[in-house]
Amino acid sequence: MTDPISLVPLPQSVVWSHGTWETNDPWEGLSIGISGELAREEYALAITPRGANLTAGSEAALADGRNTFNQIILASGGSIPCVTISDRPAHAWRGLHLDVARHFFDVSAVKTMIDGMALHRLNVLHLHLTDDQGWRVEIDGYPLLTEVGSRRAQTLVGAMGDSAPEEWVFDGTPHGGFYTQQQLRDLVQYASDRGVMIVPEIDLPGHMQAAIAAYPHLGNNPEQQIAVREVWGISQHVLGVSDEVFEFLRDVLTQIADIFPAPFFHIGGDECPITEWEQSVAARSRLTEWGFTRISEIQGAFTSFATEVLRERGKTVVAWDEVLDTHVPDDVVVMNWRGSDGVKTAVDRGFRTVVASSDQFYFDKAQGDRAAEPLAIGTDVLTLEDVYTAQYAPKGLSAEQEKLILGLQGQLWTEYIATPEHLQYMAFPRLCALAERAWGSPEQPYAQFEERLRGHLHRLEALGIAYRPLD
């Protein structure tokens, strides 16, 4: 929202009426340009009766300025105030993670989320494309990834919790979907036009059951045919260690890197059980070959391999914070989801990090009284106020350590989110609060934020976003 930034009203206004600008002077529209006099992350916007002028220190800052201008348009009610604005974000990474693997969302639904992000000057869409429950991207040379891996036979009904398998109930309805490479290229352009960079995630070496269901030789038990996972939680089926597996990863990472021009590429690295490796003769043989002493170090081999492949293509690897438990290359960006202690661990070791803490920024949690809310994961509640007031960085960090925090990111895991409307309901308005924190707007009491938010909600309505009403 624009209210917390430097906003100086001028004495006149420009009125938009029936498709034309009405003013005492000719309206010359919006002119834009890059200025070497501004910092790379800074933009300056001036709206006068004669027109609007936007300058910025970089293309990224120019996109932020355009999105501010769009906010003003949506708030105008037909009359655009004459203002001057000078602004810059506190954090370079202002993100939203979207899981399209547990439940698939078509291009139109993703575009709506991008529109909502752009409105709030969020600039990174972290797209979680693969998981145990579905493989969502076309890969040349591996047709079964989408013919088999993108479709599960049925889905668990209700909360999984700690119930025993014999108590599980399923809907009996197949669920599937995937994006062609061209669809993703088009989506990249759509997002870029709005100042949003899409960072893809191929989760490895765990969370790979859908791929192994399509190609059993990618797993640790090639003779065993498994299905795409129909329940949530952590699958024990992880990638095997054969040469064929690493060639598969090279092909996948190379093709995905070619689709997404972003300088970052997320390789997952979270929740990787070692049970199959412990029971695998091939894995133990690799352990000796690689000079490792612990089975868990195999994950580090996957991280190093993926980093090398992607580095050759100009990409910086991002990974969930579990990668810190084994060897991890120095240039990896650590995405922290396990709490502030993990943030401190990452920056203490000199790693750049993105704060994505589950206790503060997991938007798949209920937003209030669970009895009155749609089905949500776990038992925790994460309110709008919790997001706005979150202490996301540990205390006592040095100035150099604080610089290693690239930014903040909200997470939408979709085990229990199956429709675009539910997705939007879970994201907004909590994402509005995250956007202010990530931008670095001046800290204000929550009551003031909520008051301003009430005046902001009609902008969401203008985009057709089905947000959760304020209490």
Image: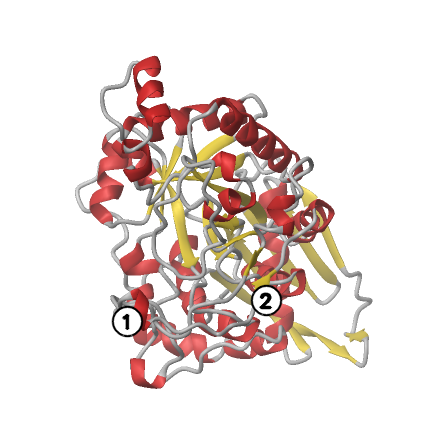
Q: Is 26 left or right of 152, judged from the image as shown?
A: right
Count of picture labels: 2
- The foreground one among 226 and 415 is 226
Q: Where is 428 relative to 393, above or below?
A: below
Residue at image location 28% in from the left, 39% down from the top: 275
Look at mark 2 in the image and give the residue it sits on.
71
Q: Point out residue 4 in the picture as x, y percentages from the top left corner.
A: 43, 64
Q: Is residue 425 visible?
A: yes
Residue at image location 47% in from the left, 39% down from the top: 266
Mark 2 to mark 1 CA distance (whole Å): 30 Å
Q: Point out residue 99 in the picture as x, y percentages from the top left corner.
A: 49, 56
Count neighbours of disc 1 (C-alpha within 10 A) and say few if under 14, some if 14 to 19, many if 20 or more.
Answer: some
- Residue type (three-letter) at the residue carrying disc 2: Gln
- The foreground one among 228 and 62 is 228
Q: Point out residue 435 in the picture as x, y percentages from the top left corner.
A: 44, 59
Give the mark, 2 or 1, whose residue is nearer the N terminus.
2
Look at mark 1 in the image and give the residue it sits on.
381
Q: Where is 381 relative to 261, above or below?
A: below
Q: Point out residue 21 in the picture as x, y percentages from the top left corner.
A: 78, 73
Count neighbours of disc 2 (C-alpha within 10 A) and say few if under 14, some if 14 to 19, many if 20 or more.
Answer: some
- Secondary structure beneath dot 1 equals loop
- Residue type (three-letter) at the residue carrying disc 1: Val
Q: Is 158 left or right of 52, judged from the image as shown?
A: left
